[in-house]
Image (tube, helix red, strand yellow):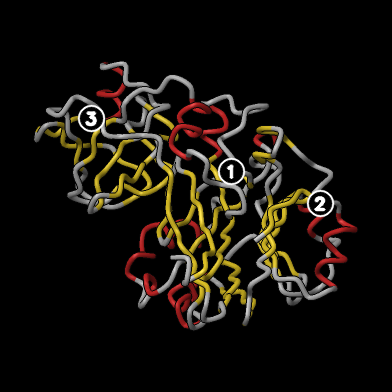
Amino acid sequence: MKNEMLTVADVAARIEDGATMVIAGAEELLRELPKGNWIGGTTVYFVTDQGGAVVRDKLFCTTFDRAAEVAVRYVGVDGLNTIAEGYKPNGFTMIMIPAFSVAHSNFAVEGQTYDNLFNQPLAGWITGVHLDDLGKKAPMIFDGRTGKGYDEGAVLLHVGLPADAKADLDILNIFAQGDQKDLTFRFQKDGFSAVTAEVNGQQVDFAQYIEDNKIDTRLPLVANYSGAMVNVSIQSVDTQSGEVKFYAPVVEGVEYRMANALGSYAQAFADGAGNAGEGQYSCNCILNYLYGELEGQRTGNFTGPVTFGEIAYILLNQTLVRMDITDTDAA
């Protein structure tokens, strides 16, 4: 697996040589690419070898050089529940979905109920735009078979690996549940927003509670999903309407706690990653990029797109998703 920041001409040459790739970059660059075994999505934020950066003139490419079998597929909103139907034997699947789309919302809320979704590694991200372009340009996804771009649905790259290789999918979450063990949050229904919440068993106006208690909304709510710490990041707090919006849905009945405050984001990623990251696929959250002031800073050896949501089977926030392809003999 190779991760590289390349010119359009270099990427086009790779595609025409038959490479299997996932590609991230500005919409106008993705539209220039030839048809082939690739999927693409829009973002201009990246973590490069030199650190976090806004890049508009090159594309970030991950090439899967051990792909034995490949299929590229676009599915509309109604086809999201067929994701696993394209799974290849001994394989993995890459997925991209546009931010703020119906598919984004539906996958976030319903994805974990799709038949056989967890039968193989499913990795990917939610595409975005420069923050200055929010509301002006739509995040896009691209189907490399046809070269067409979409602002709705999902693109999928189904990859089968040779018998002597396997894909390992994991997340690096630098947040943990906070030290206030007696402060818990529960919600009455699934969704991307909430008006009320149960705080320590008592129902409260959630927006007012956040304001009155001066909660740092740069820190996510964290739930323990069978040992995996999963974040739900706060998008906005409106005490006028009483609504709190999230970047990923809260789940009814699940216990959440506020995350511990961090010192340096970049150092936390470096400490968590150790020497890992080189030669692995990864994507990192735009909230980590912004709140952690990652421009010019590295996150260990991980490089990749900065995204509006990360996917490791389900939608995640403020998390780094990583996938490695290893030899089964070595494992």
Mark drawn on residue 215: none
Residue 322 sits above or below residue 268 on the image: below
Residue designated by label 2 = 6
User: In terms of image quadrants, where is residue 36?
Assistant: bottom right
Horizontal and vertical percent position of residue 16:
85, 73
Residue designated by label 3 = 205
C-alpha separation, residue under disc 3 versus residue under disc 2: 49 Å
Relative depth, front residue between 119 and 127: 119
Please state which of the two labelled residues, at mark 1 or mark 3, is closer to the viewer.
Answer: 1
Relative depth, front residue between 265 and 259: 265
Q: Secondary structure at mark 2?
A: strand
Q: Earlier in the sequence, mark 3 or mark 2?
A: 2
How crowded is the residue under tag 2: few (<14 C-alpha within 10 Å), some, or many (20+)?
some
Decide: marks 1, 3 in contact (CB < 8 A)?
no
Residue designated by label 1 = 302
Residue placed at 31% from the left, 34% from the top? 176
Q: Earlier in the sequence, mark 1 or mark 3?
A: 3
Decide: marks 3, 2 in contact (CB < 8 A)?
no
